Image (cartoon, grey):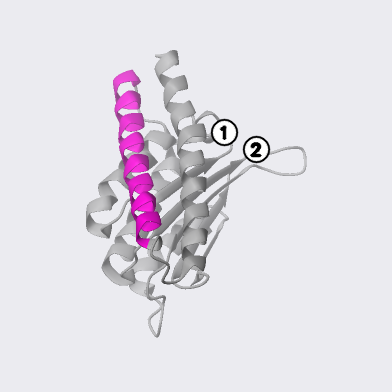
Amino acid sequence: MNERDRIAADLHDHIIQRLFAAGLALQGAAARMGGHPVAPRVAAVIDDLDDTIAQIRSTIFAIQHAAAKGPQGLRARVLELVTESAGPLGCTPALRFSGPVDTLLADAGDVVDDLTAVLRESLSNVARHARAGRVEVDLIVESGDSDGPGRLTMQVCDDGVGLGASTRSSGTANLRHRAEHRGGTFTLGPNTPSGTCLKWSVPI
């Protein structure tokens, strides 16, 4: 089981991150190509990288399911939600973890429940309103020290149509309440160069 966990962590923290970085580099190159005849081939490679990342993410989730003997850790629950959201979104969100995600939150089940509920609602809002071609989910866990508690931060950004005249208040009031109830913060604003960026952060 420990070896399965190690393999899953290595696949996500090393392989997926390198593929994601390669995809971003190619996207930057494609943007500078304009109408160059090679541009469609570069775009095809980017699509292949996205598909490969999705397949590796599914493999990670399968490995973690096979190894699990108790309640799922936060990492596995987030991977499951992201995988499930690919259909309604029309794309698989890019997912990044930073910090001791599972170890620091091993006994923080209520915080994990809140975060997964917020992520589920956030991805649902993107699917319903954003018309996005790309979605990015960042999950950051920071350890506490003598100066203060640790912090759990989640960011969900898309390249869709943005907020416009609507604040999506009906779909975000609960997300704000969950953050403020824990002494945290919730913000929803524009993404660069287009779309929307949601940030949910609470002390742990």
SS assignment at label 2: loop
Residue tagged by mark 2? 143
- The earlier-in-sequence mark between 2 and 1 is 1
Residue tagged by mark 1? 100
Locate residue 197, reporting x and y percent: 48, 65
Which region of the structure is painted magenta?
40-68
Name above or below for residue 168 compared with residue 203: below
Q: Considering depth in this image, is 120 or 180 the residue closer to the camera?
A: 120
Residue at position x 34%, y 68% from top?
A: 171
Residue farthest toward the left in the current orientation of the protein:
87
Is residue 25 on the magenta stretch? no
Label 1 CA crowd tier, 10 Å (few <14, some 14–19, many 20+): some
Label 2 CA crowd tier, 10 Å (few <14, some 14–19, many 20+): some
Say which amino acid is labelled 1: Pro
Q: Considering depth in this image, is 172 or 6 the residue closer to the camera?
A: 6
Looking at the rendered image, the quarter that the C terminus falls into is top right
SS assignment at label 1: loop
**Alpha-carbon span between mark 2 and mark 1:** 8 Å
